[in-house]
Amino acid sequence: MTEPGDLLLTWASEVGSGKLRPLLDGAEWLARAHGIRPGPGAAGRWVRDMSSLGFIDVDWASGVWSISPLVVTRIPQSDGLAVIAGRRDVEAARREEDDEEGVLVTPVPNRLAEGDIPLPASRIVAYNSHLDLPQLAERLGAQWVPCFALLAAHRIPVLTKRAPAAPPVRGEPIEHFGLADRAFTEWRERSYSDGLYRLRRSDRKKVYQFHEAGEWHHTTWEEGVYLALDKSPHPPIRWRRDPAQGRESIGQLIVEWGAPLPPLHSRVATLCLGLAPTIGSTAETMVYDNVPKDVAKKIAHSLKQPLANAL
Amino acid sequence: MPPDLRNDRTVRVSDASTLYSEWQKVLASSFFGPRDDSSPAVLFVNDGIAVEMASGFGLPGSLADSVQALIAQDTRTKAFEPILEPARVQSRIRPDEPPQTLPLLAATVIAATRMIGDGKYRSTNFFDRLAQFLTADRGYSQHYRDMLSSSFAPVAQAWRDLDTWLRSRHGRHGASTIVGSQANPWIGYPLSQALMLESDRAAITQFFERAGLTPGSPASGERLAAQIQLWSQGRALLSRQFRHALEDRAGREIVIPLLADMATAWDGVVRESARRRLSRLRLHLDRRLNPTWVAEAISGSDDMIVCGADGAEYRLLRHDEAPYYAGLTDLVFRAEALEDGLRLHGNGIAAVFRPSPIIVFRQDKYLGGWVSAENTEPYEQHLLLVHTTAEAEIDRILETACPRAKKTPDNRLGAQGWVWYQAVVLDEPEALAASGSETARLLRPSSATRPILVGGLKIATSLGGANYLQGGEPDVFLPTAGGDVRSVVVALDGITETLRATGFPFPLSTLDPPLAAGSHTVEADGVTLQFNTRTTSSGLPAAIIADVGISIAGADAGRSSESSETEAIRGAAVPGTSDEFPLIALARRRADRVVTIDHQGNTHTHEAPGAPQWAERMQDANGQLFFEVKISQPGGWLLELTGGRWRVTAVNPAPLDLGSRRLRTWSATVTAAAEGSSHPLWAEYVAAARGASS
């Protein structure tokens, strides 16, 4: 029987695009049908992970998603591994299964925490020669991207405030992002201090807005947190080198839970290994493996954060 | 002198005609008066109402007398002609007025109510009751009764004429509720007015809404009758007489076509009573659990004034297609409303909150926070506000059904005798099914009124119909009996099994063996549900709803949005993949020596690094055979020495460009590996290296 995570990817691939709500509902429903009790926010985390793994692209503001193109891309400093991301419809799966050119594609399961909705297994390719991958991509009908993580890291824009926004509607609940606890709490003052707010607009949409020097700007949850954390004495991003000899320039990117990476940053960090980030429960962090220090620096720099070295 | 019989009769007929017209006027104004909305017009009269009307309006005689006095006694088949003939004439002269048959028709309704009281829905019984009523229970002859029966065909026609008249008025005198019955072609008409009380008709619109009926579309009366029985079980929603008719075989024969007609005629309006549309008042709690009232919007009514018991007025305004009206912010929440309920009245609307010892709150996507709801939903988060009378029972049920639920006393609503239960998630069907108590009934998910398919992984939604990806078959939801667990015979593709309807769905996606791809049917409660499963959506029309990418340039750089621009990252695809990217070669870890050389005379020796931190996670994919070696642009050669033999791999090598450089290491390495490749360019490298070293 198809594993639930793989079935969800097949489903998303066959559907192609749509509103977010049915996707979230479908994922939650299938998890339940397989005896998993999705924890609070599990469906949202599942969608973010699916985006980080390069399976889907998500526009949270408009509430829509679409399946991402099928891509074969290399995993940096990985001893000859690549990952297949994007659309995996029945046709793509058939081509992969029928491929007998000697390239080994192995499903590697993604680790889940309790109450998580299953993710698809990552399709990891072990190649023997640098020539294997473009040919494999051609046979699968996929795009060949030499190394997404390194290429996209160059394209990450530096964080800026978005377009001006209307001030909050009076009388509606509004929450302020606290720098100390990195959480949202009800804001009851009459005037607004600078920082990130979560509020309901007059059209009832729940949005994130950034307040600075009396002006309001549109933002997203992730970007808003980093705007708020600008020049914070406790930077939320750290990097730790791989202890193995000869791997000084690559390691783990460790990001605090309260300051999740924006979608592009998270995808760059995730596709450094092709496996979903894992939760470092004790330290309340997300851990991205196999991230080159250069990539980590670009991620931190674009979020206006110093890159601290982790012990 | 004996009274002149003829004269006396003239006088009496004149009196009787006056009495009849008086009744006609009273009935016309009471039941068919002009109105602004097209609420249903029902000519419902029973003995009690007839007596009340006579005294209330100061009528000089009873309804029975007004009809009986005009009935012809010396005929077999034309007993009602003295009423019907003038009525026909009147209709032609005054087409704007209701037909002058209302007292006669009202009398037939009373006969029907008496018949319903007997529980015997037969024609013979009806004419007995009619004769009894008209003779004011003083006794009647078999001849008289047979005469009424033989004369009745034109009365049925009079019912049809009233129906036609109401329809020709386009609702200005109310919407017609008159329907016939094929099983009882004559007495069906009066029964259609008598069998259901106004409250039944209103309740049935609430059922129609709950059952998801499409206004104006036909539905099987038989199925509706069965579903209404299930829906209303154990709840005081329907009148005793209507429930009784539903349970009786002869009663069902009348009720079933009536329900089918009501469904076809339903305009989508949910009613609280005959004259009032129903808006449900809901209690909304924000994140801090501050209570406010909201009223559920009714389609077609976007701006109304309602007023409370204290006379305070509120303007209910609906913005766009909002599910709730704005305008109740000034309606202060008082804890007494939890036990007493709350009603606001307006012109043609009633906004109602019905009290209950258990108030279920569900998260509301529109308002945010929590909103009181009719029932629980399986697997969803709930807040419960429970009166202490039900507290012990709830404790007992939740102990197994949801041990994680947290109980806290109320300090938010100021409600004496109420407690909160937080984090109530009902995901243990059996734990809830075990209890048959009234409390369990209130807690049990029971949202659907008929078997439906829920969940599943739908594909090709633009096609309509129910297409699911194989493996993502939907669950089947079977309605409970008004919240009570029941057994249901379910046929899946013709194979029957008895299942317990517990308010929770049955998964079809985890059946062993799994369902084959194709068409499937589920039959239960007389409903057939059909769905298709497919292994792929290929070949089906696909709707592209969005094409999302992450912009990498411009003001929205870094932001995910629906965009047609090509300069966007989609998944792992990056536009404008660059050539300046370093080339990678894979070197064998077991090689004794690994060297790369280029066309300009550079030589690099590489050491195999240690195993990566994550190697174990990838062990199924990677045999740890290779390590990566970077080769700078435009390219070069990878040289591996294993067991004394060199292997040379071309990595996009460029033609030699040594200039005047004569590099010993480069030349020695190339010379040593001269046999490692048969690549023609390699031969040139070897020749150059040998020339350099000679």
Image (cartoon, rainbow, N blue to C red):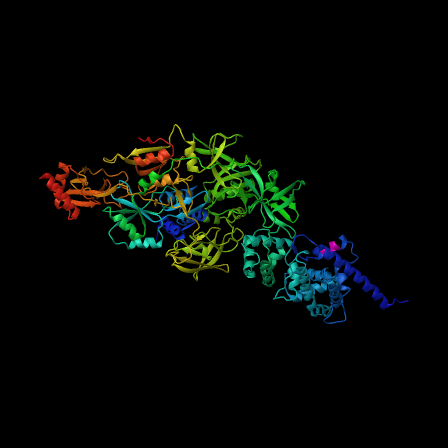
Q: Nearer the viewer, residue B174 or B608?
A: B608
Furthest toward the right, the residue is B1
Q: Is residue A216 left or right of residue B647?
A: right
Above or below — where is B41 with respect to A308? below
Q: Position of residue B343 (x, y in %)?
A: 63, 44
Q: Nearer the viewer, residue B520 or A80?
A: A80
Q: Quadrant of residue A115?
A: top left
Q: Position of residue B661 (x, y in %)?
A: 15, 36
Furthest toward the front, the residue is B660
Specify start and end residues of the magenta stretch as a single range.
Answer: B49-53
Above or below — where is B115 with respect to A36? below
Q: Position of residue A72 (x, y in %)?
A: 31, 47
Residue A38 visible in the snapshot:
no
Residue B52 in the magenta stretch? The answer is yes
The kind of secondary structure the magenta stretch mainly shows is: helix
Q: Quadrant of residue B342?
A: top right
Residue A214 visible in the snapshot:
yes
**Residue visible at 28% across and 55% down?**
A98
| Quarter of the figure that contains the N terminus of chain B | bottom right
| Quarter of the figure that contains the C terminus of chain B | top left
